[in-house]
Image (cartoon, rainbow, N blue to C red):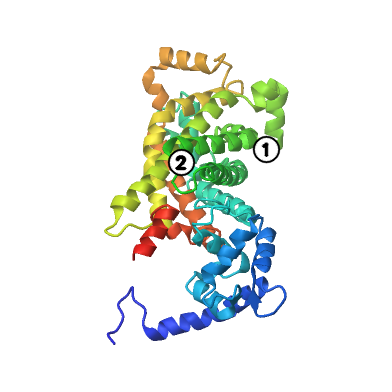
Amino acid sequence: MCSPGPWQVDSHEFSAYIAGQEDKIFSAFQELDADHTGEVDDHELLMALKKLGHNIKPDDADRMIKLLDKDGNGQIDLDEFRRFVVLLPQNQLSGGGIITNWIDSADWATGIEYRLSMTPPQQWRDRLIAGGVAGAVSRTTVAPLERLRTMMMADPANISLPGTIRKMWADGGVRGLFKGNLATVTKVIPQCAIQMSVYDYVKDKLQAKHPDDKLNNVERLTAGVAAGAASTISTYPMENLRTHVSLGRKGGYLKILNDIYCSRGLVSGVYGGFGPCMVNTVTTTGLGFLSYEIGCDLYRKYGMEKPRAPTPGERGFIAGGGAIAVMAATMPLEVVTRRMQVQGSPGHPVKYKSMADCFAVMAREEGLGSFWRGTVSSWMKVVPSIAIVRFMYEVMNSFQGSSGIRGYRTSPPNKASQQATAS
């Protein structure tokens, strides 16, 4: 036998891998074998499915059994079970993970509501954790760039990029570069967790309407808009706080929020600028998710000689690339949001009556170029931030086993089945 190359596995390595799977396979089988007879029937499968939140018809459970039942006795023994699961990734070798992939392989079972892009019910906690961790890591990495762009957008006096950087450094050295990051992370953890989870949830609901085809661009945009709206409503006070702290406002976070509330009230103060922020967030989030999905489609089709799903790192690059165009298109909304947030705070008198008035005053007094002030610093911050969020989210889901084997597919379910049959 020829020695294996760097991407090949020889017989000894393969045998060692299989041996390492055995204990997990046996434990997973015991989870399903409720009566400990050494075989799993359709009744036991139904019970396991219900525990995971999947309600299917008995006929479909019977068809799932037949999918693996080699000897035709209506039950699955350990050998038949092993044939199906032995090559699954190790993070999928649990009762829940195996059933998830088992359902995903049953493309013909029209009674099963679980389909290609759906998140299994028991994985919501994992998705929330993945989104929160991804957001925290991303924003801490780019914290100095986040403060730089906020200062340039919110304060008309900060025109020069080098000058603004010097002002940040003068405000505490290294600590000055990260001022406001705690408020940012406090906001971003729930924001990213909610955003990613809601996006997956809405996609699931839309996908269930036509399980054999991928979502169209309008549906993807709808899911992104819903994700942006949910995250903004949930975390806006922290977004407003972060803006004030980035501009140098002193005091503890609760004191700053209380001062904002006492001086301008709940609507004009704590939720000041909420309107333009909502418009900006749902627009950027919707377009951001849409551009990411389109980028992944193009990658699957043209990116490699043999089509395949992008890796987590490649998904990060795709998301970051899409953010460049989205940010350029939505920058005016971002700038107006920052102006509306900080007016009325020390050093920033109330100047704008509404979102429309802010657009008009800025165009008249500062010119159209003012709407793109801070674009370069925004690109410097947003592009790597979005890339890191997507990369970390995919890595966390893979680590937790949340993504199943669906990410390896290059086509919708029925097409995948036809291709497998043809081969």
For the question of whether residue 168 can be seen, the reply is: no
Residue 372 location (% of width, % of height): 39, 27
The residue lying toward the viewer, choosing from 190 and 9, is 9
Q: Are marks 2 and 1 in contact (CB under 8 Å)?
A: no
Residue type pointed to by label 1? Tyr
- Viewport quadrant of the C terminus: bottom left
> Image quarter for residue 262?
top right
Dot placed on the residue nearer the N-terminal end, 2 or 1: 1
Image position of 92 with respect to 225: above or below: below
Residue 97 location (% of width, % of height): 58, 64
Residue 355's tag is none
Q: Is residue 308 left or right of residue 349?
A: left
Image position of 389 with respect to 323: above or below: below
Cα gap from disc 2 to disc 1, whole angstroms: 32 Å
Q: Residue at x 51, y 72 (%)?
A: 84
Task: Identify the element where label 1 is drawn.
Answer: helix
Disc 1 marks which residue? 253
Disc 2 marks which residue? 289
Image position of 309 with respect to 378: above or below: below
Task: Identify the element where label 2 is drawn.
Answer: helix
The residue lying toward the viewer, choosing from 207 and 275, is 207
Residue type pointed to by label 2? Phe
Q: How many marks?
A: 2
Q: Residues within 10 Å of mark 2 (few under 14, many from 20)?
A: many
Q: Residue at x 58, y 51 (%)?
A: 113
